[in-house]
Image (cartoon, coloured by chain):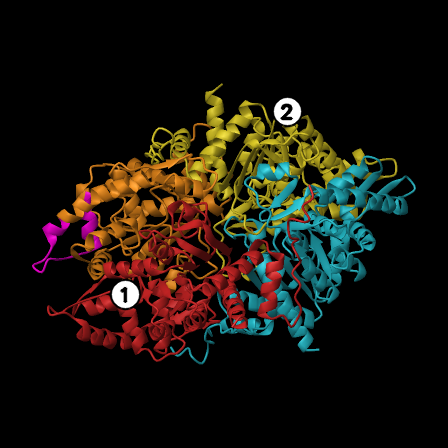
Chain colours: A cyan, B yellow, C orange, D red
Amino acid sequence: MNHKDKHPRISPINLDEDATINQIAKEFKNSGVFGAGRIAKAIDIFSEMLEKKATVFLGIAGALVPGGMKKIITDMIRNDMVHVIVSTGANVTHDIIEAFGGEHIRQVPYSSDSELREKSIDRIYDAFVADESFMKLEDNIQPIFTEIYENNKDSNNILAISTRQLMSLIGEKLDDPDSFVRAAYEKNVPIYVPAFGDSILGLQLWLFSQMKKIYIDDMGDLGEIQRSAWDSDLAGAFFLGGGVPKNYIFQSRLMSPKTFDYAIQITMDRVETGGLSGASLSEAISWGKVDQESRMTTVVSDVTIALPLIYSATLSRLKKSD
Amino acid sequence: MNHKDKHPRISPINLDEDATINQIAKEFKNSGVFGAGRIAKAIDIFSEMLEKKATVFLGIAGALVPGGMKKIITDMIRNDMVHVIVSTGANVTHDIIEAFGGEHIRQVPYSSDSELREKSIDRIYDAFVADESFMKLEDNIQPIFTEIYENNKDSNNILAISTRQLMSLIGEKLDDPDSFVRAAYEKNVPIYVPAFGDSILGLQLWLFSQMKKIYIDDMGDLGEIQRSAWDSDLAGAFFLGGGVPKNYIFQSRLMSPKTFDYAIQITMDRVETGGLSGASLSEAISWGKVDQESRMTTVVSDVTIALPLIYSATLSRLKKSD
Amino acid sequence: MNHKDKHPRISPINLDEDATINQIAKEFKNSGVFGAGRIAKAIDIFSEMLEKKATVFLGIAGALVPGGMKKIITDMIRNDMVHVIVSTGANVTHDIIEAFGGEHIRQVPYSSDSELREKSIDRIYDAFVADESFMKLEDNIQPIFTEIYENNKDSNNILAISTRQLMSLIGEKLDDPDSFVRAAYEKNVPIYVPAFGDSILGLQLWLFSQMKKIYIDDMGDLGEIQRSAWDSDLAGAFFLGGGVPKNYIFQSRLMSPKTFDYAIQITMDRVETGGLSGASLSEAISWGKVDQESRMTTVVSDVTIALPLIYSATLSRLKKSD
Amino acid sequence: MNHKDKHPRISPINLDEDATINQIAKEFKNSGVFGAGRIAKAIDIFSEMLEKKATVFLGIAGALVPGGMKKIITDMIRNDMVHVIVSTGANVTHDIIEAFGGEHIRQVPYSSDSELREKSIDRIYDAFVADESFMKLEDNIQPIFTEIYENNKDSNNILAISTRQLMSLIGEKLDDPDSFVRAAYEKNVPIYVPAFGDSILGLQLWLFSQMKKIYIDDMGDLGEIQRSAWDSDLAGAFFLGGGVPKNYIFQSRLMSPKTFDYAIQITMDRVETGGLSGASLSEAISWGKVDQESRMTTVVSDVTIALPLIYSATLSRLKKSD
């Protein structure tokens, strides 16, 4: 066998002290295998999604806002790199907390979690948030709920509202330009939160619902996202973590004749247990969520490492091709 | 230092060809470290939860029904080992599919996921389900939705129903004694499905909602599970996988003065990314979800291996102590 | 498509409080997917290896002796279930330490690793060993080295000895019937330790070598294990963890016309980074280490959970078929 | 509690399309948590190691050469960022294969590993190497072994050689400036290969040893690396993966009064199974391998992603401070 003409060599990654994001991306592509190769492929696929004007569905799971990913998500929205968002309740909660002046902190020394409890500091691995930040959420969100309720309730004094509408109306009230909930409102990017009740924001709404009758219109959300999926000529899925957002995005095109044309997932979950969070994208072909022509890759990495590289390199490629 | 009087030896695991579940549990306890030690500790904690009459909240995430865990969940319900269930939409969907005669299959040879697609077989790692099983779901669930709607709609022809109520009313209609949705109905164990829309069952309800007005009463679910948590003198959490069920259960006691007194999680997710699914139980102390007196353990294992051992050994201990 | 006649159903695992290892194995087999299915398949393959009289090569990596696996390895040797062993230096070190009266302990409370350091207790996750156990090793092994040296040195006062010989000569001196090094000596099962220097036992030999000239005959080991592999009509590999033992066993048949006919690995390592420890067994087909007719399975599990089940169930099947 | 003055905020990572490695490093540091935070900390620690003139011990495990890491390791050597190397046999084998004109390739389509076997292409996850590359190794290394043997054998025609010497003598013969074995020879950086026999290079030496008597002087290696460790005022460990190199480096300072002052590990292995590859660096405090004053971090990542970032950013910082 003479393979030399056929298969590219794995070119050793070659970086110097002035490396730019473009060079990192190029070197990862020329190496092309294992984790670095997957990041390069994700950059290629994300770039193609955007060049081909695909509708990009972004799934957000895991502690991304405490993990410092907020600004990138916001910039992706503002740079027209994302068109539909499905989020866990926690990520919108943390984003809104920061918009209200709460903060996530680090380098908090502690000898035990009990000590943190006494200090009213909550731990998210090596990130932290003080209870007072949650109090800021309560102080600020309740009046917003009241206003939304009064403006939108029906003649029976019932408010039925989809999470898409609710996130948009909340986003309108936020001042923080770095908030992705705000940016999504400004850019008219819908945010769906399928497990809205499963979050501190959800608990706040429950508190409010003790006074006023309120329903989350989950069926309305489902109809809307399916319509977005149906109406998209080309559709791309970009999953930051797995969980509910991954399945919710993938199922949005199940009832349409089309599949997702592109898919990227960044995850540390494993395939072998059968859970959807770690499931291979190839498996999704059997379900008709993607098909064999779809371009796909799984990056096995902490999102906080892989996403900044993929985002910045893709942006660079798009700007250069302007 | 003379440590011998103070610390127990790690006793090598000693099993023969007639080993019973009791012996396995005992040997794992006498070894007491790494994975085997964690399983032994989980058996101890689960046994104590039940002996002390704690309310047991079971979280169900991951492909547990395709993974063969259905009967164990059902038996846990029937043996009074579980009192509140929070499930992903997928697990109740798969349980109901089997109750309607659908089935999960294995040993399906395939050369590619595209080939499976052509054969209308969907893959869940090395488990499979034919599209016709989903058709059985559609054929059988739509009449049940109609009946539930007609019996429960309000004077404005709107049905607002919590997932707890919905699961109970569906469970009433199922014939299959092995279905955990049925068993929960019979034993009056509430099943909450916080991301109900994120499932095929949710899509079926959406189809139905195109004809009739229907709201999922997420706030009703939230109120109920918090009341269960508030009313429980002692409360134990048992998490099969992470995801929405883990957080939803943990947050149920956030607004109460009490924390969970026991917690067991079986997961393969990692702690280092900051995601809640893989978060340590110790971290939950800082949030006030558990406290330092709580008995807790994390078993890092595929649920399909660890749960059968933990369930069977705990049952054995309970029966012996009768 | 009518798949019913063709593919077996995933039968939900059904265990009661009197479950025996046989029932667990049977239920795991009837379920047949995810982790439980892999354990059942490992039992099948291990049983077939033994029924067909294959030579079984056992790879031992990870903290298996501190993890309580010593007795099972010993029993596998005594029950003719293992014929060649390749071990890390640590596992033979820990085995010999216990044979000399040292011990591994558990439930050692500590507030920090510094505190353990002050108490001269070394930590292996949640297992522990006191420095005095290592002193027992030194006290007992140096005289044995002297005796081995005197009995086996050549005319130039040089001792060149393979690890296989060394382990056998050490095994002869051990009293502990639970020691797998002793059992291997008794049953004439060779133990190879390819990275002998990478262990406390290796450091002890280095201390000895400061007085007397000693060479480890690595090439002698390589020749012998290849001869075992070449001479085996059927060969099976059983990997507890990955590391050096996995590759060393697999490469033993590289120069022979035959491949391994069976392979089982229990590991928590991942495939995606390209490292051999986590590599799929299928990949080994491309190298000619196994072939497509070989029976193989990977169990993604902590060894301390999976091995006891696989060992005990396989033993049970063998005894029943006597 | 007023935490604001005390704890830094997690600053969201902010990158644009012109991001340089310096900016990425700075943003990761300002975020400071989860994976990104760990990479930033690794850059800080590696920079400090070098500024303080610590002796840097680099452990190399996993398929790093096929994974495109060769040039970075070579550049680290040439830039005086590494002073002692401990490698698996596979990594030196793959490096030498490339130096002899063999190559690692990618994008090899295949339907099964059996098909690859027929084509004589070996797979390493998504990297590949043709059998002919191994033949190039054989053709080129055997004459080198002969020359080394003839030049270094003793009066009894026995060659006893440490892996450190052997790697240096092989490095001398390599033309490839990108080879890290060559670079190490040129810069007088010792390379230790404690499990030399566990590799194709080891098998080649075994072939040679069928004609000429040869011993690997493992004890000589052990003595030398301990002397390097003893002689180092400050010592830093940098582990790419775990395996034998990790322990071999850590144990090199066990017999000295000093511990390692710095430690960085990049790994995907888990802590919970007790294996050393995934063990926390904190645990090493209890063993006296590091102490509580040591600066340490574990980066949970594919090495091919994390190492390029850490290397390039550290180099940048060093060059800027010139």
Can you give x and y, in whole percent of width and height, for residue B19 in the image? 36, 32
Chain of the residue under label 1: D
Reply above or below: B177 against A243. Answer: above
Reply above or below: A212 against C193. Answer: above
Please rate how many residues cluster around mark 2, counting C-alpha atoms within 10 Å: few if below 14, some from 14 to 19, many from 20.
few
Whether discs 2 and 1 lie on one chain: the answer is: no
Number of numbered labels in the structure image = 2
The quarter holding residue D209 reads: bottom left
Alpha carbons under labels 2 and 1: distance apart: 66 Å
Can you give x and y, in whole percent of width and height, for residue C164 in the image? 21, 52
Q: Nearer the viewer, residue D36 or B201?
A: D36
Q: Which residue is mark 2?
A: B233
Q: Is residue D107 visible?
A: yes
Three-letter amino acid code at disc 2?
A: Asp
Please rate how many residues cluster around mark 1, counting C-alpha atoms within 10 Å: few if below 14, some from 14 to 19, many from 20.
many
Can you give x and y, in whole percent of width and height, for residue C238 in the image? 33, 50
Reply above or below: B28 against D273. Answer: above
Q: Nearer the viewer, residue C223 or B72?
A: C223
What stretch of residues is rendered in magenta? C148-171
Q: Give the secondary structure at mark 1.
A: helix
Badge number at residue D163: 1
Chain of the residue under label 2: B
